[in-house]
Amino acid sequence: MEPSLKIRPMKTSDLDAAMEVDALCLPAPWTAGIWKTELESPLGFHLVAEEKGRILGQIGVKNILDELHITTLAVRPENRRSGVARNLVEAAIEEFPDTKEVYLEVRPGNDAARRFYGSLGFRDTGRRPRYYGDEDAVLMTLSLRSH
Ligand SMILES: CC(C)(COP(=O)(O)OP(=O)(O)OC[C@H]1O[C@@H](n2cnc3c(N)ncnc32)[C@H](O)[C@@H]1OP(=O)(O)O)[C@@H](O)C(=O)NCCC(=O)NCCS
């Protein structure tokens, strides 16, 4: 990790920057209302990647028992391929050391995200019909169970 990159919990004062990142990255970014609900959820946990006071990316997860669900992840286009997302995912998992499975939904055509998750050991494990309304989601899962 670049020494200047900080991964830290998201604060409400980061919301504008996180929404700006999302608008650059996601086809259906969360509204301020959705963000508020997610940030207030007792199951939710959000991190940002910050460099020199600038928010480069964000991740949200929900923890239920030994499962972690990645609910949002985005990195500014100009800061990609330098490990920002990998550091965000690893830091989120470290926060919940009892995690046995991490899962997420991704659009079938989102090659960058599918390759990214694949590089971390996630595998395609299912399909959620019409998850995005207009499109199915591919379910990807990382198993951390010891064999
Ligand atoms: C997916 C996303 C979060 C990856 O962020 P990132 O910070 O660029 O990812 P990292 O730099 O940590 O990548 C780690 C590894 O993942 C793989 N990877 C990441 N992006 C890739 C791409 N576009 N093509 C192929 N492999 C890729 C590579 O193996 C990479 O390692 P390398 O750069 O040493 O080859 C980013 O592309 C993004 O914000 N996309 C738009 C939003 C989105 O799709 N979010 C996920 C919704 S489910």
Image (cartoon, rainbow, N blue to C red):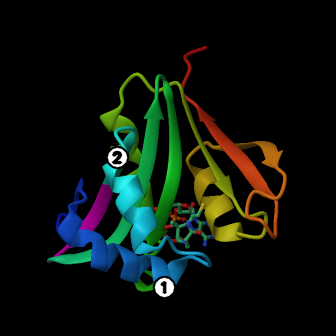
Labels 2 and 1: the sequence-earlier one: 1
Q: Do labels 2 and 1 touch, CB within 8 Å?
A: no
Where does residue 46 sit, x and y in percent of width and height?
Answer: 33, 53
Tell me, yes or no, if residue 126 can be seen here: yes
Q: Is residue 48 magenta?
A: yes
Residue at x-position 48% and y-position 83%: 23
How far is mark 2 from mark 1, CA to CA? Answer: 22 Å
Where does residue 37 sit, x and y in percent of width and height?
Answer: 40, 56
Amino acid type of the residue tagged 1 in the rendering: Leu
For the magenta stretch, what is the residue range? Answer: 47-52
Q: Which residue is mark 1?
A: 24
Label drawn at residue 46: none
* Secondary structure of the residue carrying numbered label 2: strand
The quarter in which the C terminus is drawn is top right
Q: Residues within 10 Å of mark 1 (few under 14, many from 20)?
A: few
As drawn, is 97 to the left or to the right of 111?
left
Amino acid type of the residue tagged 2 in the rendering: Phe
> Which of the 4 image quarters holds residue 43?
top left
Q: Residues within 10 Å of mark 2 (few under 14, many from 20)?
A: many
Tell me, yes or no, if residue 79 can be seen here: no
Q: Which residue is mark 2?
A: 45
The quarter in which the N terminus is drawn is bottom left
State whether the magenta stretch is mostly helix, strand or loop. strand
Say whether mark 2 is within 8 Å of ligand 1.
no
Residue at x-position 33% and y-position 46%: 91
As drawn, is 34 to the left or to the right of 132?
left
* Secondary structure of the residue carrying numbered label 1: helix
* Of 27 and 118, the residue lying toward us: 27
Number of marks in picture:
2
Residue at x-position 35% and y-position 62%: 36
* Of 20 and 123, the residue lying toward us: 20
